[in-house]
Image (spheres, coloured by chain):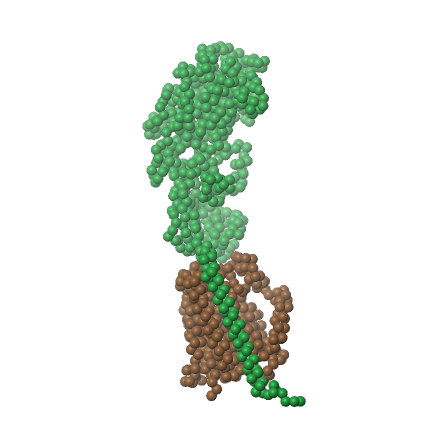
Amino acid sequence: MLERRSIHNIDWLLAFSVLAIAAIGAGMVYSATVGGPLSGLAGKQAVYLLIGLLALVLAVSIDYHTLSELSPILYGTSVVLLIYLLFFGRAIANTRGWLELGPVNFQPAEMAKVTTLLALSSFMSRRRTAELGFSNMTSILAIVGLPVLLIARQPDLGTALTFLPLIAVAAFLGGIRVRTIAILVLIPILALPLLWNHYLQAYQKVRVLTFLDPARDPKGAGYQVLQSKIAVGSGGLVGKGFLEGTQGQLNFLPAQHTDFIFALLAEERGFLGSMIVLSLYFVVIYRCIAIARSARDRLGVFLAMGMVALFACQVLINIGVVVGLMPTTGVPLPLMSYGGSSLISSLAGMGLVLNVWMRRLVN
Amino acid sequence: MPWDYRSSKDFKDFYEERRLHRRITFIFVLLAGLFLSYLSNLWYLQVVNGENYRRLADNNRLRQVVLNPLRGTILDRAGRPIVRNRLSFNVLLDREKVIDREGIIRTLSRVLNLPEETIRDRIARYKNRPVFEPVIVKEDVDLSEAAYLESRRLELPEISVAVEPKRSYEQGELAAHALGYVGEISETQLSKPRYAGFQLGDVVGKAGLESFYDGDLTGQKGWKQMIVNSLGREIRELPVGRRPVSGNSLRLTIDLDLQRELEEAFADKGGSAVFLDPDSGEILALVSRPAFDPNIFARRFSAAEWGSLINSPAHPLQNRAIQSKFAPGSVFKIVLAVAALESGKAGPGRTDSCPGYAYIYGRKFLCHQEGGHGTIAMVEAIKKSCNVYFYHLGRDLGIGLISQWAHNLGFGSRTGIDLLHEEAGTVPDEEWKRRTRKEPWYPGETISVSIGQGALEVTPIQMASFAAAIGNGGVFYRPFLLKSREVRDGVEEAERAGEVVRRIHLKPSTLQVVKQAMWEVVNQGGTGTRAMIPGKDVCGKTGTAQVVKASAGVKSEKLAESIRDNAWFVGFAPRDRPRIAFAVFVERGGHGGEAAAPIAQRVMLKFFEKQEHHEEPAQIARTAQHP
């Protein structure tokens, strides 16, 4: 459990950055929803933030080695929940990703991110070979692939995609050869036509095509990207001011309290605001990497780096969509987008990284 | 196998450790690079291109809404409204709020008494319009329907009633051609400098006074700037903009009572009539038949109704008073008399003998009176409308003199009435024949022209103007319909005075002969007896213009209607100080004395009755000196 000396070993810079982003997020959720039909959401987000902080404290309190031993149970639970959803989940916005627990809904997929990270790190830390062989690679693919497939079946392709960096980081740090990487990069490229013709649904094809050429369908799929870019660009250097963003306040922005919250921030706070938030995200990632470097064992390294992969990837995808560098995927911005499950899982994940830092010194 | 230091565990750990750290560093550099590129992309979007995006954002949220001014109203000379803007109620369907589409269509069909199919069609028409734009299901519903729907706003949230100002011609077909109508601006109009600042969809005058005085009636557009949300819904108005300025009201010279009397007198006959004040040119009543209801143009107009007006063989949209040219028939004999007296070619004492026909240039020309008029002098020849007398007089005058006097008396040129598309008519002579037909003038044609036939063409407004000039002693006023404009709220500009276009100096003796003859036409058993009003000394001249040659000498009622003669009756009253002058033309009316004279009589009766009851303020002070 939490010992006194550990408190002194909290990485305060990381903790502060994480909380600052979450607080800014709650403020932006308020701006995105005030005066509209969703005006209660900012209050809810504050409650989720408190719950998330509890999850963080919990994740810090228990030695990560203990958590690693519990990981099969935690991972198993998530998988069972995901399977359950496919059969009994309630469809919200066409995906069966929500579990109803009395008054609240939560997304097991978000919980699965943290449990998969734990399970994968446990596996990687127990490996004894220097080279990443075929059987190990298969195990990595299995551990991550199982929740990914289950989530993709909901169907929630955006969330499923965010797991993939876990595979990449595990393989890369696990010692995969550069030659193998090249092959692994080639396979998806060759598989693209197959994916395009047999797996992608029509709306997803439209999104990709629209991304490649936003003018294709300015009133449809391209509309979101265009309006988002207008919001970001029109913020200028210092922004239009809190609650003064016309794109956001007049609802030109799609999903402005969830996936496009960064666009609202960029509109109301300008380049300075976007730069501050982007810098905070970078500080978080930088600290996580520093913690990975100073971890006392492989488990710590993989936990911290896995979290970097999950976190950085979501941040880059989300902001990439907002500024029109990527096709719309529906990935929330960690710590900022409205949504309890995402916020709590991000904070719990950060708790694990803080845990690694706190216990970096071998007794 | 020799010992290899690389197989020692220490080295392996060290080697692996180094590799791990190298790869972590690689990831860090990769992420740092990505974050930097994102930051530079944000810089490019927000700082470099910020202005452009801000403009786009403004285009998104700011909508300039044009505020259309109310069109000016049109009043009669006594200030009674003829054309107004009334509030009409349109039933709108908000497609965003529709839940049970079929149910709402059924309800609307029941309440509005419209077939369900019609409603479906109207909704379908909006398929490609933004969904917040309401569908106009039915326009101009009556108040009870509007009230019924308004009172059920809670049950039927998707239905609303909107108020829209509509041009309303209070009297229906009355004076339709003078008033004209409004409609959406055409591409052709848009290209004219006069319509600068107009856009498609704007309502402008299309004909009649609505078109001639469009600039006065239109007013000035205003605008307001609205903040709209992404659905185009108006959220808030910005404190900028300009209020629209309503168009000026017009007060006409038309007297509603006389106009109504004239319309009723015409009943279902075709033709045209103009009554005016011979001392100013003010038009008191103007009719063209068949007419149309200008109100149909104020509606969102169905192609079928439009087509039926355009393609009707009776040409109801044509203003016959100024656009239709007819042979003047025997009315033209007055022109010959004036030409003879003024040129000295013949005096009032010139007599002729009429056996009912005349042989001139080897051809036989008939008089309308079988057996003839016997020996006859000028005044009686006019009174009885003897053709033979005027055949000979015309022959003696020659076409040059006849056409010169026709021009002097206002024929062959526009009167300048304040309506568009006035026709000038035709006064034929040798030069005209050469120019238009490349042929010489045949003397026989002079004979036809002498009794107002042949290539001679006049308009009813020219005839009325001519009658007024004879009545007032030779002054030609420009006939006009606009008495005064309202320049500001309720403030009128000075009434327009008559504008003298031309004066011809006629000898008093000429005037006396002509007036005497015209007086006898009505009051001494002449052809215009039916226009007589005891004590009012009505003067007039009938005309019966042939549509086909065969009609000469045949009773008009014996002819098929399509080839019956056109009937004219022009004149003025009272004889010595005329207050009213007129031209009545009845298409296919047969004899002027039978068809047209009673119409003139009826309107004059009304006119004098009003004068006696002082319904009209005392005659307007005249600026024009009476000769």
Please identify the residue farthest to the bottom as the structure is shown. Answer: B2
The structure residue drawn at horizontal position 47% and vertical position 81%, both measured from the top left corner, is A357
The structure residue drawn at horizontal position 53% and vertical position 13%, both measured from the top left corner, is B356
Residues B243 and B490: in front is B243
Residues B258 and B38: in front is B38
Where does the N terminus of chain B fall, quadrant-wise?
A: bottom right
Decide: is A83 above or below A30.
below
Q: Position of residue A249 (x, y in %)?
A: 43, 60
Q: Position of residue B156 (x, y in %)?
A: 45, 54
Q: Tell me if I can see residue B534 in this picture.
A: no
Q: Position of residue A134 (x, y in %)?
A: 63, 79
- Left-right relation of A223 to B494: right
The structure residue drawn at horizontal position 48% and vertical position 52%, both measured from the top left corner, is B133
The structure residue drawn at horizontal position 56% and vertical position 19%, both measured from the top left corner, is B441
- Rendered hue of chain B is green
- Left-right relation of B81 to A99: left
Please identify the residue farthest to the right as the structure is shown. Answer: B1
Q: Tell me if I can see residue B216 in this picture.
A: yes
Where does the C terminus of chain B fall, quadrant-wise?
A: top left
Residues A293 and A241: in front is A293
Q: Position of residue B175 (x, y in %)?
A: 44, 33
Q: How many marks?
A: 0
Residues B509 and A187: in front is A187
- Rendered hue of chain A is brown
